[in-house]
Amino acid sequence: MLNNTQDNAPTRSALLDESVWEKSTFNGRWRSTRESLIVTEPATGERLGSVGACAPADLDEVVAAARNGQTQWAAWTAEQRAALMRRAAAILEQDREAIIGMIIRETGGVRGKAEVELQGTIDELIHSAAILIGPEGHLLPGTHPARLSFARRVPIGIVGVIAPWNFPMLLAMRSVAPAVALGNAVILKPDPQTPIVGGALLARMFELAGLPEGVFSVVNGGADVGEALVTAEGVRMITFTGSTAVGRRVGELAGKNLKKVALELGGKSPFIVLDDADLEAAASAGAWGSFLHQGQICMASGRHIVQRKVAADYLALLAAKAKALPIGDPYRQQVAIGPIINDRQVARVQQIVDDSVAAGAALLAGGTHEGRFYRPTVLGDVKPGMPAYGLEIFGPVAPVVIVDDEEEAIRIANDTEYGLSAAVQTGSLERGLRVARRIRSGLMHINDQTIHDHAGIPFGGTGASGNGSRFGSPTNWDEFTEWQWMTLSSEPARYPF
Ligand code: NAD
């Protein structure tokens, strides 16, 4: 028999108990704060929860806790650290459904996106445990028979991680997990729009997994707290994922303060359709590349570059797909397109579309919105100089540029300061490789679209998309450790004076 008594209410898991964080932040223990940061659900505009807010001055205490924690943690064996990372992964596994629900509600992404984000986060933890199986250094040729000479990798110390809101859990964790596993302490600053799945939940996960106090901390706030983290004495490395404009500022501050910095920034990724491509497959890939998560992905297909011979057919297929995609609240309805993160971003997308149409682009689908729900949009006849040609849009817009031949396709693909991801569709692998080899991009896919990532690949961009860092085991060794040369002699060295 069904009843509604308290006894039958589902028990709240230890991981997802929001009373732990709604007025607190975490630096090894939960500390209550004077102010709270309110989190709203982008689809409804309603309050979803809150976390404790930090001020720049709080960094002193957080860094002190991290210093103590890191010293203890670096003394754990690799095996012990790996076991803890696996325990953290198991804690997320246990609450899979509830976490997916929170990701959908806080980011406005559809269920499939949330599933990929959670699985990616779990994979980051598992890969960071696996990396610890590898050797930590190598033996060097000696210059003296009684001397052993070797190079070993040592933790950097305290690493600051600044993350965006679009994949808040995964993009935080792809730095946090390897940095922690390799013996560093981490201070994470999530985006203030997504501090629950992007911060509080991760803090709770590490706490429940038994990470020593101070090894992982979360500071909640905006640009002022971010800059305090970048400049804080004792924080030796910053990994930043976000816009190119803010990345330049973070890079400048880090350089001035002599810190190592890894920047993962914006993109305008080319998606090339050659005249021998399977057009149905290309249009499906192109729609996915531009409309997934409402286009709010750094690797989104930002420019469709299509050979003239197939352009009319490709545009018709792409526009038909755009018009057919269901839009709505992804937590309460079965949809393909959810809301844009905030009203400011909706207005920006609309401005780029309107200005491009005014400059001569053809509006073939979408181009309007209802509140935060922007309709998937296809712009034909996009030309250099139009806003949709040059700017990263971060909305569900597919700008299509028509080209005469391969040479022009390559030139347009490289006509951007960015270089994150790229894709080419063709019936000939040879043509695909010929084009792909000449495109300046950190990630490149033949007969696919531009959005791909997983824990084992070297992820990163070039140009205005990043400063050459690459995340993903085994490149994480290079990012999150430093080399130390050590020699060891059985006899004291003797010198001429
Ligand atoms: P954003 O740059 O506005 O914010 C990112 C983070 O930086 C947030 O946590 C924010 O609070 C913080 N921040 C803002 N100003 C700061 C400052 N002065 N000092 C320190 N921290 C500061 O980016 P966004 O709009 O939230 O995210 C979208 C952008 O991120 C897009 O350009 C997208 O392409 C990029 N992105 C890149 C990747 C990648 O891997 N290359 C992944 C996701 C998103």
Image (cartoon, helix red, strand yellow):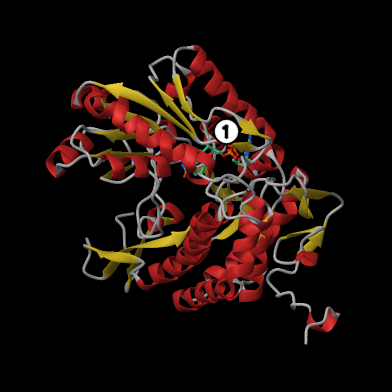
Q: Quadrant of residue 253?
A: top right
Q: Which residue does the numbered mark 1 point to in the structure image?
A: 246
Residue neighbourhood size for the residue with mark 1, other residues' Cα within 10 Å, grouped as few (<14), some (14–19), many (≥20)? some
Q: Nearer the viewer, residue 182 or 423?
A: 423
In the figure, is residue 410 to the left or right of 478? left
Q: Is residue 300 visible?
A: no
Q: Nearer the viewer, residue 316 or 104?
A: 316
Q: Is mark 1 within 8 Å of ligand 1?
A: yes
Residue 297, percent across and down?
A: 49, 42
In the figure, is residue 189 to the left or right of 413? right
Under circle 1, the secondary element is helix
Q: Quadrant of the C terminus?
A: bottom left
Q: Quadrant of the N terminus?
A: bottom right
Q: Is residue 254 visible?
A: yes
Residue 319, percent across and down?
A: 42, 33
Please identify the residue farthest to the left as the structure is shown. 430
| Quadrant of ligand 1 in image | top right
In the figure, is residue 51 to the left or right of 489? right
Q: Quadrant of residue 228?
A: top right
| 254 to 38, vertically: above or below | above
- Please report the residue visible at 77 percent of the width from the left and 45 percent of the height from the top: 57
- Please report the residue visible at 52 percent of the width from the left and 31 percent of the height from the top: 366
Q: Amino acid at mark 1?
A: Val
- Please report the residue visible at 35 percent of the width from the left and 55 percent of the height from the top: 457
In the figure, is residue 463 to the left or right of 371? left
Q: Nearer the viewer, residue 43 or 271?
A: 43
| 120 to 316, vertically: above or below | below
Residue 105, percent across and down?
A: 66, 54
Q: Quadrant of residue 407?
A: top left
